[in-house]
Amino acid sequence: MGLSDEDLERYARHIVLREIGGPGQGRLRRARVAVVGAGGLGSPALLYLAAAGVGRIRVIDDDAVSLSNLQRQVLHRTGDIGRPKVESAAEALGALNPGVAVEGEAVRLSEENAAALLDGVDLILDGSDSFKTRRLVNRTATKLGVPLLSGAIGAWEGQIALFDPARGGPCYHCLFPEDPPEGASPACSEAGVLGALAGVVGCIMAVEAVKHLAKAGETLSGRLMLYDALHAESRVIRISRRCDCEVCGDRAPG
């Protein structure tokens, strides 16, 4: 199915980009994406994925909107306090772009349901806030052969990487084979977090998702971007697949 006259006007600024054009916008329209977490990172990422015309977006989050969320979770409003985040998200994304199909899954990701919730998509974005969930998402994405775009923030710093072992890249476990020592990576509720930092990192996740889906430019596959908001610095480092990785390496369970 081609782009309608309304699509041509809505996505005109994408279509004139030679790296995206009509073919790339068509890829975005046919794309299916799962986003784990509709919080600080998920909020800006989801808004820009919907604005970009990604055809189907599955939002997975079992939390409800609270007042303390609103300092950084720009997808939700004061009137949404107490509502399930997936409900608030679907409403906001539908208002932004009615042409995008949004599926809300108000459940906690677990070993029992992860494969079913993350199957059938072209890309997974993980904006969760715990190592346990990130490891589960990584194991599931690796098993399904789906690329995983992972972001994380804390205090003034953020990081983003694309993990794609099915196409020769490393997985999240290659980079972080062990959890940090207790207390080394406190939750945002303990250490605090700059609200706008979530916007910066979440928007970079959306940029990388659009590039990956539209087949434009060089992605962060095999690379980790680090952003330090306090000192206005960013850098990108190479990361390699580990042959002894327990998730994607030679000894990984079949």
Image: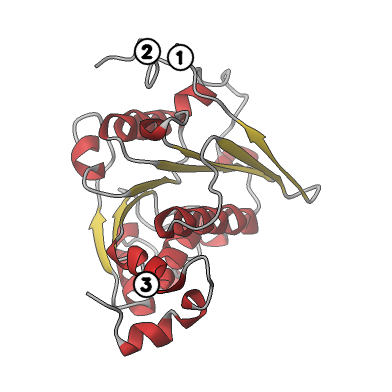
> Label 3: which residue?
92
The mark nearer the N terminus, 1 or 2, is: 1
> Label 2: which residue?
250
Q: Quadrant location of the N terminus?
A: bottom left
- For mark 1, does the 10 Å Cα neighbourhood hold few (<14), some (14 to 19), or many (20 or more) residues? some
Name the residue type under label 2: Asp
Measured Cα–Cα span from mark 1 to mark 2: 6 Å
Which residue in the rendered view is the most extreme toward the right? 231
- State the image coordinates of residue 212 (x, y, percent, origin top left): 45, 53
Name the residue at 40% across, 30% down.
165
Q: Quadrant location of the C terminus?
A: top left
Residue 238, quarter of the rendered image: top right
Name the residue at 66% across, 52% down.
194
- State the image coordinates of residue 88 (x, y, percent, origin top left): 34, 66
Name the residue at 30% across, 80% down.
3
Measured Cα–Cα span from mark 2 to mark 3: 44 Å
> Tag 1, which secondary structure?
loop
Q: Is residue 97 above or below residue 193?
A: below
Of badges 2 and 3, nearer the viewer stands 2
Front residue (pair 59, 223): 223
* Marks 1 and 2 close (CB-CB < 8 Å): yes
> Tag 3, which secondary structure?
helix
- Any part of residue 204 in sight: yes
> Label 1: which residue?
243
- State the image coordinates of residue 202 (x, y, percent, origin top left): 53, 55
